[in-house]
Image (tube, rainbow, N blue to C red):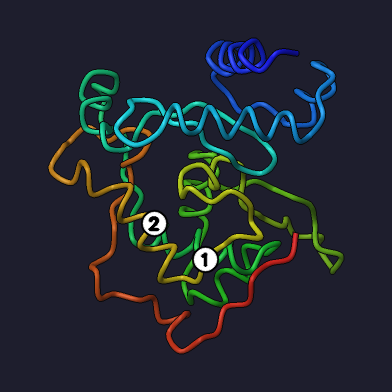
Amino acid sequence: MEIEKLDNALEALLFVSGDGLKLTDIMEILELQKSELNSAIKRLKEKYSDGCGIHLISYNGKIQFASNPDYAEIVSTVLNPIKEKALTNATLETVAIIAYKQPITRLELESIRGVNCDYVVQTLLNHNLIEVVGRKDVIGKPLLYGTTDEFLKRFQIESIKDLPDYEQLLENIRIITDAAETNEQKGLYNEFELPPEDEIPEFLQGEKVDKIEA
């Protein structure tokens, strides 16, 4: 396929889909080599970059169009008139634990945090930031939780293998949300209530966090 035609076709697919498209599906259906698709993605990322209102993001073997977080305040003001419930510090702490310790059970979460986690787990499930990934092979077969593709998108992480250390993850959250701190209507990129800048959860103080193997 000609370069210009490929770029235009990929652009159209991303626009119409609205959701993430698997790279393997695109290669199979369009009969493309991995190098051809990667080159097209690189060109589109250059086209949709910097101050452009749309960015092309990659995560977990998928690509998707997303709004530029610099315009989150305008987008949320126009498209999100109903205020969404902000995630609390406790919820952010819980999703951080799940990200680094997954797969993990609710009881293991409560052991780390020292409090009941029923509400925050349900909140994260409702926001599609975590999901049930199986059951632990112990008495009672408790549910195991892990992070979702939505988690990767929200925190701008391409793959769970690229999970940063805790401080960097917190900074990613802060960058995404700073654009609309004073805006009451929170949208796709800025619906989290952040802990104070100097606040690091006790469970991570002095702890070396190992990267999770996929």
**Label 1 near label 2: C-beta < 8 Å?**
yes
Compared with residue 99, is residue 176 higher up or lower down, i.e. above or below? above
Number of numbered labels in the structure image: 2
- Residue 118 is labelled as none
Q: Nearer the viewer, residue 131 or 142?
A: 131
How far from the left and from the top, in percent, is residue 22?
71, 30
Kind of residue at badge 1: Pro
Q: In which quarter of the image is the C terminus?
A: bottom right
In the structure shown, which secondary structural element does the residue marked by tag 1 occupy? loop
Name the residue: 26% across, 27% down.
76
Which element carries disc 2, helix, strand or loop? helix
- Quadrant containing the N terminus in the rendered view: top right
Residue linked to disc 2: 172
Query: Residue sitting at 57 percent across and 78 percent down?
Result: 209
Q: Residue furthest left?
A: 182
**Callout 1 crowding tier (Cα within 10 Å): few <14, some 14–19, many ≥20:** some
Residue 149 x %, y %: 61, 42
What residue would you read off at disc 1?
Answer: 164
Decide: few, some or many residues near mark 2? Use Cα within 10 Å; few <14, some 14-19, many ≥20. Answer: some
Q: In this view, does 65 lie above or below 29?
A: below
Relative height, residue 96 to residue 158 (above, below): below
At 79% from the left and 52% from the top, the residue drawn is 134
**Quick one: 207 or 163, which is closer to the camera?**
163
Is 66 situated above or below 102? above
Which amino acid is tagged 2?
Answer: Asn
Mark 2 vs mark 1, CA separation in Å: 9 Å
At horizontal 43% and vertical 85% (from top left) the residue drawn is: 205
Q: Position of residue 30 (x, y in %)?
A: 79, 16
Which of marks 1 and 2 precedes in the sequence? 1
Q: Residue 207 in the image: x percent, y percent? A: 51, 86
